[in-house]
Amino acid sequence: MKSLGVVKAERGDIRAERLEGRVKPSVPFPHRHDFFQLVVVAGGRGQHEIDFETYPIRAGAVFVVKPGQVHRWDLQGARGYVIEFYVESLSLDAMDRELFQSLHELPEHLKLLSAPQQKEFYFHCEKMCGEFASRDRGYGSALKSHLNILILSLFRLSGRTAVKKSEGAFLGDFERLIELNFSRQHNVEFYAKALGLSPKALTMRVHRLLGKSAREMIHDRCLLEAQRYLGYTTMPIAEVGLSLGFQDPNYFSRFFKAKTGFSPGAFRDRNN
């Protein structure tokens, strides 16, 4: 496969369906979405790979697949729920916005440890599937209410907290800028200017919130995309570098090896 396609949602701001009626038993080819996808597993087995990490399919597992992440799965008799949504299209009040702006902080895989936790998740997912299928009056509001409870439960389950409103908005703006420009702009100065900050102020603020520098965030995003293309496509290595703004193939190779310990070719061999 030369490149990675993006799968878009079919209809509605929030989509909720049962896992067994939605997917084929095996989706071995890598793909990605432009929306958030929650996969709540109620039974079955198999495996789910998200950006090179492979997780087991077991009852009680919850997967949070973020926009742009590459994933594929192999399921045997899996039962559960698939919930998809675009954060940008949801009508959110201030409290909801603070919660949803932090979604990228959630881990990709969580395990519901207790039977009551599983029962609560399955209840809300089942209600969402019913609302989505019936599309009765007010179904959109009902879907959002159940989704809010699920997202809040995931934060509590993960042990993480949503960042403060002002900081969440700042990080969201910075991450969106990176997402739009990482393949062309690698310098902190560009992002600092767009955010109305000095490069030093941007670096200090990001480090205080995330424990890493602004430069690291930009480079990490470039690296992840390079890994995706090298591991999941047949795109020539020089072309991968060019697509990410590296005009010199040798510089791209040095950058990649410094970050991973492997040359681009060796990384591709290990993951194919």
Image (cartoon, helix red, strand yellow):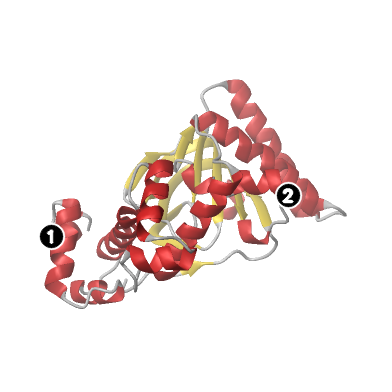
Q: Which residue occupies 48% across, 64% down?
A: 196
Q: Amino acid at mark 1?
A: Ser
Neighbor class of circle 2 (other Cα within 10 Å; few <14, some 14-19, many 20+) is few
| The C terminus lies in quadrant | bottom left
Report the number of numbered marks: 2
Q: Which residue occupies 49% across, 43% down?
A: 63
Residue 39: image quadrant is top right
Task: Indicate which disc residue 263 carries.
Answer: 1
Task: Indicate which disc residue 93 carries.
Answer: 2
Residue 92, above or below 229: above
The location of residue 188, given as percent across then percent down, is 34, 63
The location of residue 2, given as percent across then percent down, is 31, 74
Kind of element beneath mark 1: loop
Residue 31: image quadrant is bottom left
Identity of the residue furthest to the right in this view = 137
Q: Nearer the viewer, residue 125 or 199?
A: 199
Q: Nearer the viewer, residue 197 or 271?
A: 197
Q: Nearer the viewer, residue 169 or 109?
A: 169
Q: Which residue occupies 20% across, 53% down?
A: 259
Kind of element beneath mark 2: loop
